[in-house]
Image (cartoon, grey):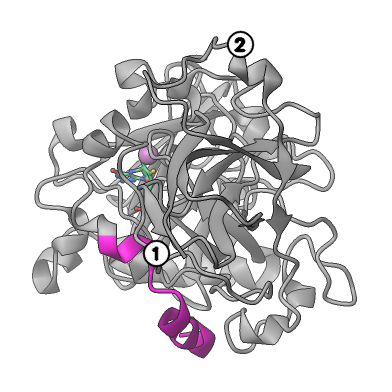
């Protein structure tokens, strides 16, 4: 494990671990702005990078369906489920008029096994950074350094493909069709990658270690540009189909199954907070750097006018005065943030000198902070929003929360006496 993760945890206690136990996906979806990570009280802190860049594999906020949860299986049950490196297999078949030259099947011993995947990794493996962000939860779940083989390089083993339009895939689900959690991509999203962008991966390492069962190991799909539901855990089955429709489980409940990751800023803690009037007030949070990139994060502070919550069409929005928040710069020393033995030069998106080519990096978490001017005692409202690289301020251009929860959050700041 990356020793810096433990060390840093002492400074910034796992955002996610604390709430994971309490939070069900549905509860968070229903009350995303009311539920927030717990953080130390926001007080003045050095403006240096002072949080772990990577989230420990066990401290991601977990979003897993299934009873029993696949990651609760141990011993023989885990082995029987194909959830150990020795027993894991990936099957690939065709359906509905699509054909593949070679199917990979458990039954005839042609399925891809874990050593076979690692072998592909020796040639095609990629290290890349990506944060998980659930469509329906208003903060990133955690950020990892993943290692995997592009799915297109796994598909080579299938030889010639005909009439494939879409790729359907799912993981272990207790042999109960009702528990299946599946996802899909267009074949072109798997095979064609725009220059400078990431393809979907069949991933086998996280933060320099095998992916633990709780994070979807031994093998998980990771789709860099998408919300978490495309990154299927406990991956075991891929079906190449002539169907053109998305079949994602996450299309239920009006979720948009084709939504790219949105760019959005979130408070670390949306609960009201009280400060003395004579101390600088530092407020912190994260921003998810989605498909449209991140230009900056800005905040609007106003005395709480009382009355009903600010409506989305309230004229006050047009009068709002937005101030820039600071985005934390890249870590000065990547060797303290990355797992031992991983040089930043080996990580996708870094240059030959080991510096990130863009900052903040696409599909990762940016940390922002704002030091509020000295305030008179009273009650204030603080709102924060991202502005993407196209100049769209959150929640534009796609305010539909079912495509990613990007409502502008409000935090009440109470300033007391000195
Ligand atoms: N097999 C399977 N994969 C899954 C899920 C699931 O329930 N089962 N949940 C998905 C959803 S909705 C999200 S947001 C992410 C969460 O990933 P995490 O638990 O590693 O944070 O996993 C995705 N992959
Ligand atoms: Mo999700």
The CA distance from mark 1 to mark 2 is 33 Å
Is residue 63 toward the left or the right of residue 219 in the image? left
Q: Position of residue 317 (x, y in %)?
A: 62, 19
Q: Could you say which disc has been placed on residue 315 in the image?
A: 2
Is 90 in front, or is 254? 254
Q: Could you say which disc has been placed on residue 72 in the image?
A: none
Bin the neighbour count of mark 1 within 10 Å (Cα to Cα): few under 14, some 14-19, many 20 and up: some
Image quadrant where residue 16 sits: bottom left
Is 297 in front, or is 223? 297
Circles 1 and 2: CB distance less than 8 Å? no
Q: Which residues are magenta?
A: 1-18
Is residue 181 toward the left or the right of residue 3 in the image? left
**Residue in the image at 26% along x and 57% along y:** 20
Where is 343 relative to 287, above or below?
A: below
Q: How many marks?
A: 2
Where is 255 relative to 5, above or below?
A: above
Verify whether residue 9 appears in magenta. Answer: yes
Q: Position of residue 295 (x, y in %)?
A: 78, 42
Can residue 110 be seen here? The reply is no
Image quadrant where residue 17 sits: bottom left
Q: Could you say which disc has been placed on residue 39 in the image?
A: 1
């Amino acid at each position: 494990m990356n020793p810096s993760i433990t060390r840093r945890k002492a400074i910034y206690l796992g955002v996610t671990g604390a709430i994971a136990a309490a939070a069900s996906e549905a509860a968070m979806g229903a009350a995303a702005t009311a539920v927030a990570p717990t953080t130390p009280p926001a007080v003045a802190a050095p403006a240096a990078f002072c949080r772990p860049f990577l989230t420990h594999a066990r401290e991601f906020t977990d979003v897993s369906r299934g009873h029993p949860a696949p990651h609760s299986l141990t011993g023989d049950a885990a082995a029987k489920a194909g959830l150990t490196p020795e027993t894991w297999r990936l099957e690939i078949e065709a359906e509905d008029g699509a054909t593949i030259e070679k199917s990979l099947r458990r039954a005839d011993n042609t399925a891809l096994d874990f050593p076979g995947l690692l072998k592909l990794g020796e040639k095609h493996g990629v290290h890349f950074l990506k944060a998980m962000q659930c469509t329906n939860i208003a903060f990133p779940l955690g950020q990892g350094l993943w290692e995997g083989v592009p799915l297109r390089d796994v598909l080579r083993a299938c030889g010639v493909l005909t009439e494939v339009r879409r790729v359907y895939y799912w993981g272990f689900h207790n042999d109960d069709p009702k528990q299946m959690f599946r996802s899909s991509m267009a074949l072109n999203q798997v095979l064609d990658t725009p220059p400078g962008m990431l393809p979907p991966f069949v991933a086998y390492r996280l933060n320099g270690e095998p992916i633990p069962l709780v994070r979807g190991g031994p093998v998980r799909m990771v789709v860099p540009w998408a919300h978490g539901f495309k990154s299927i855990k406990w991956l075991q089955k891929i079906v190449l189909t002539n169907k053109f429709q998305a079949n994602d489980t996450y299309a239920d409940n009006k979720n948009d199954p084709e939504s790219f990751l949105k760019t959005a800023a979130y408070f670390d803690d949306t609960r009201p907070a009280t400060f003395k009037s004579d101390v600088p007030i530092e407020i912190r949070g994260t921003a998810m750097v989605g498909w449209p990139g991140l230009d900056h994060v800005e905040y609007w502070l106003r005395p709480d006018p009382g009355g009903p919550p600010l409506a989305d069409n309230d004229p006050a929005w047009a009068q709002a005065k937005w101030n820039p928040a600071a985005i934390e710069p890249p870590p000065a020393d990547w060797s303290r943030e990355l797992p031992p033995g991983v040089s930043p030069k080996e990580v996708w998106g870094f240059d030959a000198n080991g510096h990130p080519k863009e900052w903040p990096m696409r599909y990762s978490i940016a940390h922002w902070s704002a030091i509020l001017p000295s305030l008179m005692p009273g009650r204030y409202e603080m709102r924060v929003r991202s502005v993407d690289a196209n100049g769209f301020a959150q929640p534009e251009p796609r305010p539909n929360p079912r495509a990613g929860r990007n409502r502008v959050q409000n935090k009440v700041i109470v300033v007391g006496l000195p």
